[in-house]
Image (cartoon, rainbow, N blue to C red):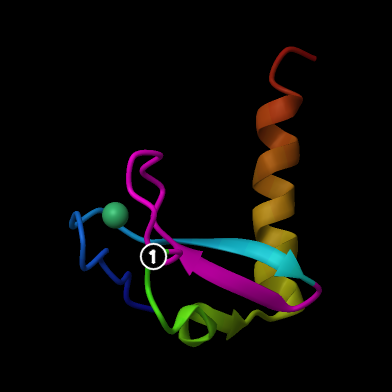
Amino acid sequence: MSTKQCPQCGSDLKKCLIQQNYSLVMCPQTDCSYPFNDSEVTENIVYTEDKEILKAAKSRLKEGKENR
Ligand SMILES: [Zn+2]
């Protein structure tokens, strides 16, 4: 899997889950509004498999449990 780069600031784009099985590919930089200033935001919505969501959720849980 290749990581796309933000066409506006060059940062690695991240997937943000917006609804079940769909992610929005967006820029992690808070001072960069990509893709919300793009006319075709729908092109950034990608299908995301359950296992990919689970993987992300698990790593998030792991981070939260570090002090246990
Ligand atoms: Zn950006």
Would you say 60 lies left or right of 6 here? right
Magenta-tinted stretch: 20-36
Is 40 in front, or is 11? 40
Is residue 66 shown above or below 6?
Answer: above
How packed mark 1 is, by other alpha carbons closer than 10 Å (few <14, some 14-19, many 20 or more), is few
Q: Position of residue 56 (x, y in %)?
A: 65, 55
Name which quarter of the figure residue 31 lies in.
top left
Percent coordinates x, y for residue 57 in the rendering: 73, 52
Disc 1 target residue: 37
Q: Quadrant of ligand 1?
A: bottom left
Q: Quadrant of the C terminus?
A: top right
| Residue 41 to residue 55: above or below | below
At a point 39% along the width and 79% down the height, the residue shown is 1
Residue 21 counted in the magenta span? yes
Chief secondary structure of the magenta portion: loop
Q: Residue at x 67, y 60 (%)?
A: 55
The percent position of residue 15, horizontal first and vertical second, equals 53, 64
Q: Nearer the viewer, residue 20 or 9?
A: 9
Amino acid, disc 1: Asn
